[in-house]
Amino acid sequence: MFPMERILHGVMRFRMEVVPRRLGLYRELANGQRPQALFIACADSRVAPELITQADPGELFTCRNAGNIVPPYGQATGGVSAAIEYAVMALGVRDIVVCGHSDCGAMKGILHPEALAGMPTVRTWLNHAEVARRVVEANGPTVDKLQALVEENVLAQLDHLRTHPSVAAHLAAGDMTLHGWVYSLATSEVRAFDAEQHRFVPLGSTAVPAVSARRRPIAARRGDVRG
């Protein structure tokens, strides 16, 4: 079966088998949406937010792009900024997740820019992760820099998220929570950044960790631990 034939077969199976089992839900969603969270994830084909969270249609407002990037407010007026503003102001979302993942091609490109030759748009886009690269280069481990960069990038994008007026206003009011996650492709484990411990911990090991003000790069903490 050719790739598009497989996709078309999936569309027909969805309509004929899946929808009838939950017809009430789909009819309700036809009249509007009330998502529980904004989920900003990488566009990597191996990352499926609804599958990872086992969310029903209508529960996540998703925004996906190369490297789960959030440009600082005003630097790039585009789809990501518009999605954030709409989710917060129009849909009333009060939880936002930025989710990175292992083996991220975007992060590999930052570590090895020669791999991005001939892709000027990608290189420009990934400049929004430059702060994460510099933190890892200055403070990170001598091995597994990719994993360190994935984690630092999540925190960097959360910092950028705070520059968006719609987000900043609700954070100041105390009625919005930010979450930083990293998903493992190999194990399906999700680790969340715990601001109190200042590290990523397995989701479910404690109460749902939330991100508050950052104190220092987690890469620097790794350096302290290594001694």
Image (cartoon, rainbow, N blue to C red):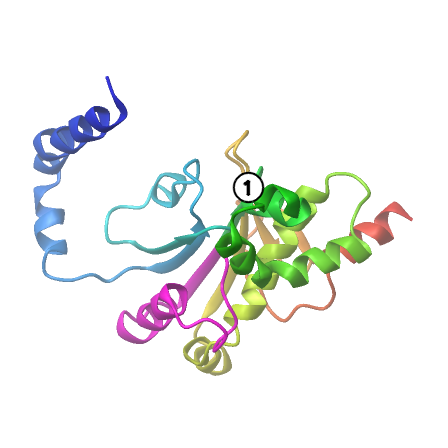
- Amino acid type at circle 1 is Gly
Q: Is residue 175 above or below residue 66?
A: below
Which quarter of the figure is the N terminus placed in? top left
Q: Residue at x 67, y 44 (%)?
A: 112
Q: Position of residue 157 (x, y in %)?
A: 55, 62
Residue annotated with mark 1: 105
Residue pictured at 35% horizontal, 70% vertical: 82
Residue 70: % across, % down: 49, 63
Looking at the image, the residue that sits furthest to the right is 227
Residue range in magenta is 69-98
At mark 1, the secondary structure is helix
Q: Is residue 67 magenta?
A: no
Q: Is residue 75 magenta?
A: yes
- Residue 158 spot, x, y in % from top left: 55, 64
In front here: 39 or 133?
Answer: 133
- Crowdedness near tag 1: few (<14), some (14–19) or many (≥20) residues, C-alpha within 10 Å: some
Residue 123 percent coordinates (x, y): 56, 55
Asked whether residue 195 is in view, the answer is: no
Q: Is residue 99 visible?
A: yes
Asked whether, in this view, residue 66 is left or right of residue 194, the answer is left
Question: Seen from this angle, which residue lies furthest top?
Answer: 1
Within the image, what quadrant is residue 108 found in?
A: top right
Which quadrant holds residue 184? Answer: top right
